[in-house]
Image (spheres, grey):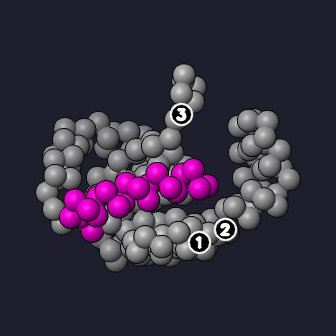
Amino acid sequence: VLQVLVRRGARSASSELRWLAMLREPKSKISILAIGSRGDFQPYLALQLSLQKAGHAVRMYAYENFAKQAKQYSVDFFSLKFNVEEIIRTDPAIREAMTEGDIKKYLEANKNALPLDVLVKVWTPVIDDLETYRPDLLITGPSSKPMGLIISWRMDIPGFIIDLQPTSPSAEY
């Protein structure tokens, strides 16, 4: 799958400019996958509000624990039936891995906290809704890169990975 995605990316790189230009035109349908913690969700909520202000129809996909905040801003929101904050708060292995900044421990803890049957249960309604909504563009963040790439490839729509969080140390972070 990754080889296919890489080849597709190389073929479609020139068309990315066309889709960036599309963002200047009103009334594009855009979906945003904002999967992760509050630090993943809030920047994409701000992006959603800005895109809507520019005239685009934007649907956000995020965990159910962010539904209340999305409702406060009256945005189009699809809730993934999973509460990531509950897992972070209650799973000692995830808390330990995050506290230590140990990516190997974190991935192992996630594998245990999110077994395949749970992932299928959480993501199937998202994929079904995306197929009904039929966005012109899919934006995904760092925590949902693999799913975003697969979904955009499967639906044959452009997908952009946009990191709105710092990804490496700097003087400000």
Check disc 1 and give the amino acid type.
Glu
Range covered by the magenta-colored residues: 36-57
Quarter the C terminus occupies: top right
Residue at screen point 42% across, 65% down: 60
Coordinates of residue 23 in the picture (x, y in percent): 20, 53
Q: Is residue 69 above or below residue 165?
A: below
The answer to whether mark 1 and mark 2 are in CB contact below 8 A is: yes
Local packing at callout 1 (Cα closer than 10 Å; few below 14, some 14-19, many 20+) is some
The answer to whether mark 3 and mark 1 are in CB contact below 8 A is: no
Q: Give left or right: position of 147 versus 47.
A: right
Coordinates of residue 85 in the picture (x, y in percent): 69, 61
Check disc 2 and give the amino acid type.
Asn
- Residue located beneath label 2 in the image: 83
- Residue located beneath label 3 in the image: 167
Check disc 3 and give the amino acid type.
Thr
Residue at screen point 37% across, 54% down: 47
Q: Give the numbered dot on residue 108.
A: none
Q: Is residue 31 above or below residue 168?
A: below
Based on the picture, tell me whether residue 55 belongs to the magenta stretch. Answer: yes
Q: Give left or right: position of 60 versus 101.
A: left
Mark 2 falls on what kind of element?
loop
